[in-house]
Every structure is written in C-alpha cells, then in structure tokens.
Amino acid sequence: RLLNLPKKYRGILRSRFVEGEILMIDFKSLEPRVAKYLTGGDTQEEDIYQDIINGLGYIVDRVVMKRAVLSILYGMSEEQTKIGELSDDRVKDIRQRVFEYFKIDR
C-alpha cells in the first residue's frame, strides 16, 4: 500500500536509526513500464495510465486507473478487483483493457 500512499502522508515514515534517513526514488510508472517492456511493447508513452484511459470509451480518474493497473499486474483476481465506484461491467472492461495493453494473455 506504500505505492499508493499520497505524498502528503509520506512524512509518517521515519528511520529507526538516530541520524538515519529514508530516501525515495520515484521512477514514473516503473512497474507498468517494465511489464510493457517485457512483452515487447513501446514504453515511450509519457503517462501509461492516461494512455490506458484513452483507449476506453469513458473517463476514469488517473489515480483510480493507477490503483487498478498495479493491482492487476500484481495478480489481484477479478473477484477482488474493486475500482472506485465503477460498476462490475466497467471493472471487467478495465481489466480486459489492462490485459490487452500489457499482453498478459501471452
């Protein structure tokens, strides 16, 4: 759940060492870019999550799509996938789009 922790809450993380620090390196969309690369896809998109949204016939909030993509890539089952306030039909549609986008069937 740390992957989706809003920036405003990241200050709650503290080092257990007296003068220790916690460093964060932010690779934009690292997991999805690696997944796309491994299946031979183009990883040049500026925003992978928005690229997936653009392939849908309706609007989905980017934060909601990011959670959906990471959940699906990490193996969350269809029964467990709940995407915001979206209907079950739209959840299935988004799952299918993510599977196609990352060529998961391969």
Image (cartoon, helix red, strand yellow):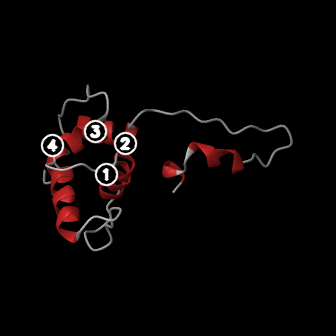
- Occupied quadrant, residue 83: bottom left
Q: How many C-alpha atoms fall within 10 Å of the one at disc 1: few (<14), some, or many (≥20)? A: many
Kindly identify the residue that appears in the image at 33 percent across and 49 percent down: 61
Report helix, strand or loop for mark 3.
helix
- Residue 31 numbered mark, or none: 2
Relative image position of residue 53 (x, y in whole percent) = 23, 44
Kindly identify the residue that appears in the image at 21 percent across and 58 percent down: 95
Q: Earlier in the sequence, mark 3 or mark 1?
A: 3
Identify residue type, mark 2.
Glu
Q: Earlier in the sequence, mark 4 or mark 3?
A: 3
Q: CA distance from mark 4 to mark 2?
A: 20 Å
Report helix, strand or loop for mark 4.
loop
Question: Would you say the residues marked 4 and 1 are in contact, meaning their CB atoms lie under 8 Å apart?
Answer: no
* Residue with the most extreme front position: 59
Q: Which residue is mark 1?
A: 69
Report helix, strand or loop for mark 2.
helix
